[in-house]
């Protein structure tokens, strides 16, 4: 084969931030040159005095395999005969001040298992995919108009093997996760999983949000090809895969990106621009083309090489605002004197336009907690950032504050559950109850609920039902679907033994049936008509803490009426207004005995009666149980 090298075109495209498959050139690539099998190495270190590659193949001797600088952009390269897949390696970089730095490869596809931090030569080519049908359907689907119910999973703690001397962590492998997770997610009715902490990271307690190996699926669970197996298997079971992605910051670990060649090439050198004081991490320099290229190509890498269906971009607000988490004197204004990070804005526009344009049906999801406008707006038509979805943090905050209240006080906080509808269609939202809400002494979801043991379950079922009825896609963190009592910890598996208790099993069954209902009825996910698809029936019944609303289907068939009672008070003859004289069929009740409730309904069909109620010409009389959410279908 032709000699592999970082040529003039590579130099040009990399300098323009448009070398979208740069990971096929930089890093370590097993090749045959001049009849010899070995590995081609290339690394960007523009301010290094000299660079060599060290590893198991040369006894970690920096003198054996010096690298050659290929051009003005600062890429160094060499070919090492005999260096093979699986070998550990690092780059030995002599800084201009004479220091020797031993750095992991920023473009490595595989890493040493922590606490080791070397890179490992990998060959990610040649995997036989079996998900062509999934990818074809994905290309034809607009995710904004499709069902999207996400199960957020931390792979290291979802399930664990018993710890042993040979396996102290007890991690499931990617292959084991593939089968266990696919079975569970299919049974529970989720459409997608979102995996935390897949990119390589040194510290388990960071949950994968302090990344050192952006191009390396973590070695905790296996090899890169085994991660491909996980994605492939989930796809074959009609389950989408979303990854958490962290372009906002990176840690200061000595082997990582920080001061990579002895100078700040990935981050700003001025700490007012280049560091997060609260997090103790470095901020990427989004104005430098080679850095933008590193990140944009990385997003493409996960989607195009590993077939993932979307990226949930972490800490977007920290990228958009120059003063995020900083005090006066700790940040520098932009050229107009404002706090907007103009370079990050352009980065997002470039990133999202490219990713979604090249990969129809994929998703870019912003975890953005402020009122920044048009996060999901079109880049060209609306000067938006171009994300597919935005996490609805405002809804989450108001919802949890309301659900924590003793039911007596809910009537004084009625608007916490209604305010979100004033902006529900200003962005394409995902309603989230994520890992962030069940850590750091915030309590698990079940333990946020007021009341005695049984009350907690009834409250939580009511809350999940309201969430499912509210416009927006859905995300729930693992364990909360069966009432995990402990706060989540990355160090232990979920408390699956709780499912031996009736109430936990009933809650899990109820969440499953909520998901099945969500997928069955387009009224709950099409959202195509915005406010035409949602109608309050009674938004003002604060004294009784009852909410009623309709989700209209785009076809006006199989519309859904929700009646939500957030107190422990029974309403034996609750009237709810309906706009037409079409029979209403009860399709789900949180108070059903199957889910641990006490409300058995003999006849699920209710015929509206003429007579004004809630401003509607007809009404249905329904015996509403304590904490009951009743859902009716009508045409």
Image (cartoon, rainbow, N blue to C red):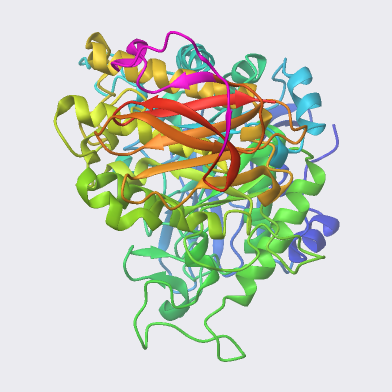
Which quadrant does the C terminus fall into? top right
Q: In which quarter of the view is residue 265 placed?
A: bottom right
Would residue 582 be found to the left or right of residue 354 on screen? left
State the residue in front, 111 or 566: 566
Residue 492 percent coordinates (x, y): 24, 27
Residue 438 percent coordinates (x, y): 29, 41
| Residue at position x 59%, y 19% in the image | 234
> Please, is residue 622 above or below residue 187 in the view?
below
| Residue at position x 43%, y 53% in the image | 540
Residue 378 percent coordinates (x, y): 76, 60
Number of dots carrying numbers? 0
Magenta includes 596?
Answer: yes
Q: In the current view of this chain or complex, which residue is farthest to the front?
A: 611
Q: In which quarter of the view is residue 224 placed?
A: top right
Would residue 543 be found to the left or right of residue 19 on screen? left
| Residue at position x 59%, y 30% in the image | 560
| Residue at position x 36%, y 41% in the image | 435
Which quadrant does the N terminus fall into? top right
Q: Is residue 70 visible?
A: no
Residue 117 percent coordinates (x, y): 39, 41
Would residue 311 be found to the left or right of residue 477 on screen? right
Q: Is residue 548 visible?
A: yes
State the residue in front, 475 or 56: 475
Q: In the current view of this chain or complex, which residue is farthest to the left?
A: 452
> Please, is residue 348 above or below residue 560 in the view?
below
Q: In which quarter of the view is residue 113 placed?
A: top left
Q: Which residues are magenta?
A: 586-611
State the residue in front, 365 or 512: 512
Magenta includes 374?
Answer: no
> Please, is residue 174 above or below residue 268 in the view?
above
């Amino acid at each position: 084969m032709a000699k592999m090298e970082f040529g003039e075109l590579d130099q040009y495209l990399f300098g323009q931030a448009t070398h979208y498959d740069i990971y096929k050139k930089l890093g370590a690539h097993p090749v045959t040159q001049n009849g010899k099998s070995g590995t081609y190495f290339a690394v960007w270190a523009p301010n290094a005095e000299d660079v060599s590659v060290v590893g198991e193949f040369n006894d970690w001797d920096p003198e054996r395999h010096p690298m050659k600088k290929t051009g003005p952009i600062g890429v160094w390269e060499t070919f090492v005969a005999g260096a093979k897949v699986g070998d550990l390696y690092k780059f030995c970089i002599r800084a201009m001040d004479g220091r020797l730095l031993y750095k992991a490869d920023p473009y490595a596809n595989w890493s040493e298992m922590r606490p080791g931090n070397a890179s490992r030569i990998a060959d990610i080519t040649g995997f036989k995919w079996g998900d062509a049908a999934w990818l074809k359907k994905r290309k034809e689907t607009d995710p904004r108009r499709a069902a999207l119910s996400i199960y957020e999973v931390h792979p290291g703690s979802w399930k664990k093997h018993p710890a042993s001397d040979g396996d102290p962590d007890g991690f499931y492998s990617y292959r084991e996760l593939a089968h266990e997770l696919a079975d569970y997610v299919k049974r529970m009715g989720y459409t997608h999983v979102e995996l935390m902490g897949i990119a390589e990271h040194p510290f388990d307690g960071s949950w994968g949000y302090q990344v050192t190996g952006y191009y390396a699926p973590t070695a905790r669970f296996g090899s890169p090809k085994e991660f491909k197996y996980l994605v492939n298997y989930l796809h074959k079971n009609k389950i989408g895969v979303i990854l958490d992605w962290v372009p906002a910051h990176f840690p200061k670990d000595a082997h990582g990106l920080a001061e990579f060649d002895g100078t700040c090439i990935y981050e700003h050198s001025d700490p007012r621009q280049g560091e997060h004081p609260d997090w103790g991490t470095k901020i990427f320099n989004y104005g430098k083309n080679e850095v933008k290229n590193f990140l944009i190509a990385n997003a493409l890498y996960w989607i195009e090489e590993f077939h993932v269906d979307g990226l949930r971009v972490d800490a977007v607000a920290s990228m958009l605002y120059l003063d995020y988490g900083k005090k006066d004197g700790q940040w520098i204004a932009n050229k107009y004197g404002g706090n907007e990070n103009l370079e990050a804005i352009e980065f997002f526009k470039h990133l999202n336009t490219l990713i979604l344009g090249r990969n129809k049906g994929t998703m870019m999801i912003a975890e953005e907690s402020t009122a920044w406008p048009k996060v999901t707006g079109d880049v060209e038509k609306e000067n938006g950032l171009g994300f597919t979805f935005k996490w609805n943090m405002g809804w989450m905050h108001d919802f949890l504050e309301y659900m924590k209240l003793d039911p007596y006080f809910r009537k004084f906080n009625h608007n916490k559950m209604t305010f979100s509808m004033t902006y529900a269609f200003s962005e394409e939202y995902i309603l989230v109850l994520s890992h962030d809400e069940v850590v750091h002494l915030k309590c698990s979801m079940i333990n946020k609920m007021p009341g005695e043991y049984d009350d907690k379950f009834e409250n939580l079922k009511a809350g999940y039902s309201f969430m499912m009825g509210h416009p927006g896609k859905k995300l729930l963190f693992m364990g909360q679907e069966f009432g995990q009592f402990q706060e989540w910890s990355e160090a232990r598996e979920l408390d699956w033994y709780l499912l031996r208790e009736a109430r936990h099993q009933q809650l899990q069954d109820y969440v499953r049936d909520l998901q099945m209902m969500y997928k069955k009825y387009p009224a709950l996910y099409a959202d195509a008509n915005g406010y035409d698809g949602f109608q309050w029936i009674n938004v003002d019944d604060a004294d009784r803490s009852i909410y009623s609303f309709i989700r209209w289907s785009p076809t006006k068939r199989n519309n859904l009426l929700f009646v939500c009672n957030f107190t422990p008070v029974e309403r034996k003859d609750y009237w709810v207004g309906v706009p037409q004289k079409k029979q209403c069929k009860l399709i789900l009740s949180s108070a059903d005995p199957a889910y641990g409730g006490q409300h058995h309904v003999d006849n699920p069909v209710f015929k509206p009666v003429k007579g004004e109620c809630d401003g509607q010409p007809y009404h249905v009389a329904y015996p509403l149980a304590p904490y009951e959410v009743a859902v009716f279908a009508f045409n």
